[in-house]
């Protein structure tokens, strides 16, 4: 199996440690992984801003870059959902259909393709899981079985586990007050349940929550699923 690793724009620029952890996690499964250097955005930013016509060329470039891989894996539920669902705006050539079908979130790949992934992680902390809206509602992600492989981890049950963090892409810019209020509610739920860390399949959600955590000086930290699954003492 030859996997193409797709790294979202904000991860590439702001959270390279997440990309490195995703690569390490995939290589630990004994598969061939490549990172195409000519990859760009998946087009989600354009579509979220109502500019899907402008995004079509970005979609087409993504297909051209990744069409020859057996699977395309990304540590981002929102980018994965973008490719699977919004690329319906392209003419449905065999290449487009193949890329849409074979693009998947990292957690889905580990659970559904690898099935018994090799995970040797140690993380002795109380962790609250936040699955972003795209991952939860568009992809049906549930990475909890993966977290069961992490030694020392205590998974915290939230009162509102399916509640949005408030990021929502451009929503955080156009509705900042409401976006921040939703984020604060999510953080309050985590603190009430005694969580030390918030884990997510989407770094964008974590970026939003981390900003609120730092502003309020809260005793919480954030960690991407890929980093948690490769955590060492």
Image: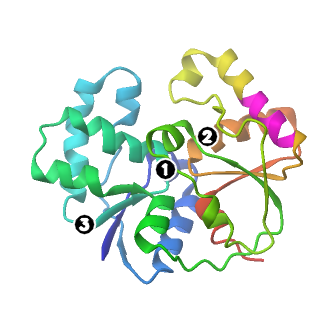
- Does 164 appear in magenta? no
Q: Is 163 situated left or right of 106 in this image?
A: right
Disc 1 residue crowd, few under 14, some 14–19, many 20+, Cα 10 Å: many
Image point (84%, 50%), residue name: 195
- Does 185 appear in magenta? yes
Between 88 and 204, the one nearer to me in the picture: 88
- State which quadrant residue 224 falls in: bottom right
Image point (67%, 17%), residue name: 178
Residue placed under numbered mark 2 in the picture: 205
Alpha-carbon span between mark 3 and mark 2: 28 Å
Q: Helix or strand or loop: what does disc 3 sit on?
A: loop
**Residue 203 - label:** none
**Residue 76 - label:** 1
Q: Position of residue 161 (x, y in %)?
A: 70, 40
Between 225 and 145, the one nearer to me in the picture: 145
Question: Mark 1 or mark 2: which comes first in sequence?
Answer: 1
- Determine whether 208 is above or below 226 in the image: above
Alpha-carbon span between mark 1 and mark 2: 10 Å
For the N terminus, the image quarter is bottom left
Disc 3 residue crowd, few under 14, some 14–19, many 20+, Cα 10 Å: some
Which stretch is magenta?
A: 183-191
Image point (18%, 48%), residue name: 96
């Amino acid at each position: 199996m030859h996997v193409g690793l797709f790294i979202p724009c904000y991860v590439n620029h702001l959270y390279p440690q997440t990309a490195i952890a995703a690569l390490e996690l995939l290589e630990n499964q004994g598969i061939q992984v490549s990172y195409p250097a000519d990859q760009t955005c998946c087009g989600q930013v354009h579509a979220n801003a109502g500019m899907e016509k402008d995004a079509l060329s970005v979609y087409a470039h993504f297909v051209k870059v990744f069409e020859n891989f057996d699977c395309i894996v990304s540590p981002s539920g929102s980018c994965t959902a973008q490719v699977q669902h919004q690329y319906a705006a392209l003419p449905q050539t065999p290449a487009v259909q193949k890329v849409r079908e074979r693009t998947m979130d990292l957690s889905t790949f580990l659970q559904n393709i690898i099935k018994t992934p090799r995970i040797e992680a140690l993380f002795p902390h109380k962790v609250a899981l936040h699955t972003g809206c795209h991952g939860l509602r568009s992809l049906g992600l549930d990475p909890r079985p993966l977290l069961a492989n992490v030694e020392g981890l205590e998974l915290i049950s939230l009162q509102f586990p399916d509640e949005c963090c408030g990021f929502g892409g451009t929503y955080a810019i156009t509705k900042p007050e409401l976006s921040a209020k939703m984020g604060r509610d999510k953080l309050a739920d985590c603190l009430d349940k005694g969580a030390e860390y918030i884990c997510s399949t989407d770094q964008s959600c974590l970026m939003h929550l981390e900003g609120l955590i730092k502003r309020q000086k809260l005793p919480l930290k954030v960690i991407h699923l890929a980093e948690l699954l490769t955590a060492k003492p």
